[in-house]
Amino acid sequence: MTLSERELETFARDGYVAIRGAVDRETIDDCRAQLWDLLDESPDDPTTWTEPVRRVDSPMTPSFAAAARASALTEAYDQLVGQGRWMQRIELGNVAVRFPTGTDAGDTGWHIDASYLPPGASRYFVNVSSRDRGLLMLFLLSDVGDDDAPTRIRAGSHRDIPSVLAPFGETGLDMFDIVDQLDAIGSRDTSERPEVLATGAAGDVFLCHPFLVHAAQRHRGTRPRFLSQPGLMLTEQFDLDHPRSPVERTIAAALAQH
């Protein structure tokens, strides 16, 4: 699906765009069924749902490959990142399955995702040019309502991050040091930005700027929620001196304002 000019403007302003029905229901239902097969919990027995979250790697099967390669998404990747600049996925990475246990998993802090591991480092880093990562993607593998632990998004927060990362150049920071830097300037949760919930139907996908601040939350609903959030990795690094894509241009524009 080709993104409209309005959707591209929304991405630049808010840091994300929702592609509704990006993956067809039959494919997404089969993906979820395969994930249940990898879990100890039973979909029909809530007494087995004892942990607030379980994480499992998505298998490399035709259904997961089809979801990752849905035409509505690949066309949007070209528009947001640039044709020929991103790496095709054959799976959806790690899947977080949140259960309605009423307990906190302790992993609900605001953050951005890191993308590369420098030599000798033990934690992943991110730098001002978003080395290696073109997008953060939120694949809804089940229906997600307001009470079903939807990802929380700080709309527009992607424009706050470049000035935090800029002093650290190409080396960048690890994801925990980024949190410390945000703490130091009093905007760890970028609370001045509106909070949006990534809700929708199974098969919807949110394509997010790699610097978008987001967070998980406790499940308050009744049915387990399945979500993967893989990165769209780059085959050609971004060039902020000559920005060609919406992702690059928003970073360059944010830096120009500081």
Image (cartoon, rainbow, N blue to C red):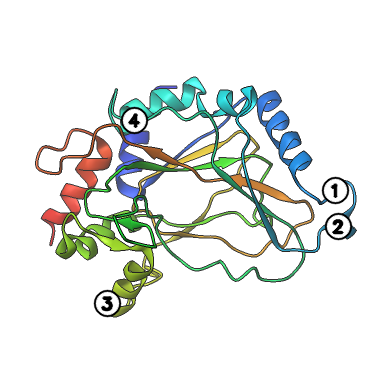
Secondary structure type for disc 1? loop
- The amino acid type of the residue labelled 1 equals Ser
In this view, the mark in front (1 or 3): 1
Lateral position of residue 230 relative to residue 80, left or right: right
- Residue receiving disc 1: 42
Secondary structure type for disc 4? loop
Earlier sequence position, callout 1 versus callout 2: 1
Lateral position of residue 228 relative to residue 99, left or right: left
Q: Residue at x 31, y 60 (%)?
A: 120
Earlier sequence position, callout 2 versus callout 3: 2
> Residue 191, position in %: x, y?
40, 70
Cβ atoms under marks 1 and 3 closer than 8 Å: no
Binning the other alpha carbons within 10 Å of mark 2 as few (below 14), some (14 to 19) or many (20 upward) gives: few
Secondary structure type for disc 3? loop
- Residue receiving disc 3: 185
Earlier sequence position, callout 1 versus callout 4: 1
Q: Could you say which is closer to the camera, residue 202 or residue 89?
A: 89
Q: Which mark is residue 48?
A: 2
Q: Which residue, as the protein is rendered here, is positioned at the far front?
A: 120
- The amino acid type of the residue labelled 4 equals Trp
Q: Quadrant of residue 244?
A: top left
Secondary structure type for disc 2? helix
Q: Residue at x 63, y 35 (%)?
A: 59
- The amino acid type of the residue labelled 3 equals Ile
Binning the other alpha carbons within 10 Å of mark 1 as few (below 14), some (14 to 19) or many (20 upward) gives: few
Q: Could you say which is closer to the camera, residue 27 or residue 24?
A: 27
Cβ atoms under marks 1 and 2 closer than 8 Å: yes
Q: Could you say which is closer to the camera, residue 213 or residue 45?
A: 45
Q: Residue at x 18, y 63 (%)?
A: 168
Q: Quadrant of residue 216?
A: bottom right
Binning the other alpha carbons within 10 Å of mark 3 as few (below 14), some (14 to 19) or many (20 upward) gives: few
